[in-house]
Image: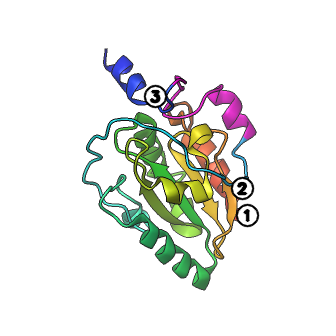
């Protein structure tokens, strides 16, 4: 019963039942192919009921203690992204945007993978991480649409920005929307490749 409720909560588009918290298609195929690099051109038109997103705090910093702690709907995501880019201009580390929501099971799994011994050092040393809350696909959608197409990516959706703010890669293919099917090693492989530029 709880599984069915979680799956129902992950239904994003009005007529499409999606695997994980986001996009259609095989998660194994998406993970093998990797994320695409094309930015989104339009915001998704989705209308779902709002729900509490939790009280976790996101941050624009790095380091194990600075990894975002969930998705905080009260944060100014636009300011967080700008702050991360400003800091990246100094050290040339890319900015990793993590679009998601606290209700999403796959977002929670990705958070655990981010905190694994294989992934945390990569995030700490190679990226500036910003978590952006999208609520029930009713929050920060204008910001998300600049970087990723949530209609195809689902959530969690990851975007890597160069220090100048250009999109280096975006998971428009939904590679992370079924994070439950991913291992820490798979996430680490993506992060290593993306850090290279």
| Up/down of 103 relative to 140, above or below | above
What quarter of the picture does the C terminus occupy? bottom right
* Image quarter hosting the N terminus: top left
Residue nearest the observer in this picture, 95 or 10: 10
Relative placement, left or right, of 191 versus 74 is: right
**Badge 2 vs badge 1, beta-carbon distance below 8 Å:** yes
Residue 4 sits in which quadrant?
A: top left
In the image, residue 80 above or below residue 97: below
Q: Position of residue 141 (x, y in %)?
A: 48, 53
The one nearer the camera, 114 or 107, is: 107
**Residue 61 visible (yes or no):** no
Whole-number angstrom distance, CA of label 2 to CA of label 1: 5 Å
| Residue hosting label 2 | 193
Circle 3 packing at 10 Å, graded few (<14), some (14-19), many (20+), is many
Start-end of magenta stretch:
15-33
Image position of 103 (left or right of 42): left
Compute the Cα span from label 3 to label 2. 30 Å
Extreme residue in the top direction: 1
- SS assignment for the magenta stretch, majority: loop
């Amino acid at each position: 019963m709880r599984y069915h409720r979680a799956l129902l909560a992950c239904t994003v588009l009005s007529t499409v039942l999606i695997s994980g918290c986001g996009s259609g298609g095989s998660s194994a195929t998406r993970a093998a192919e990797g994320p695409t690099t094309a930015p989104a051109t339009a915001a998704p038109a989705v209308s779902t009921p709002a729900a509490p997103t939790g009280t976790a705090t996101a941050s624009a910093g790095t380091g194990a203690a600075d990894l975002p702690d969930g998705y905080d709907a009260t944060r100014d995501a636009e300011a967080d992204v700008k702050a991360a880019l400003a800091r990246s201009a100094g050290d040339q580390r890319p900015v990793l945007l993590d679009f998601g929501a606290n209700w999403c099971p796959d977002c929670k799994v990705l958070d655990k993978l981010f905190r694994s011994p294989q992934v945390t050092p990569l995030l700490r040393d190679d990226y500036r991480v910003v978590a952006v809350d999208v609520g029930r696909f009713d929050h920060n959608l204008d910001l998300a649409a600049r970087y990723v197409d949530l209609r195809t990516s689902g959530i969690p959706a990851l975007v890597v920005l160069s220090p100048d703010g250009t999109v280096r890669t975006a998971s428009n293919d939904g590679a992370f929307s079924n994070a439950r099917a991913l291992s820490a090693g798979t996430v680490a492989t993506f992060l290593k490749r993306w850090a290279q530029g």
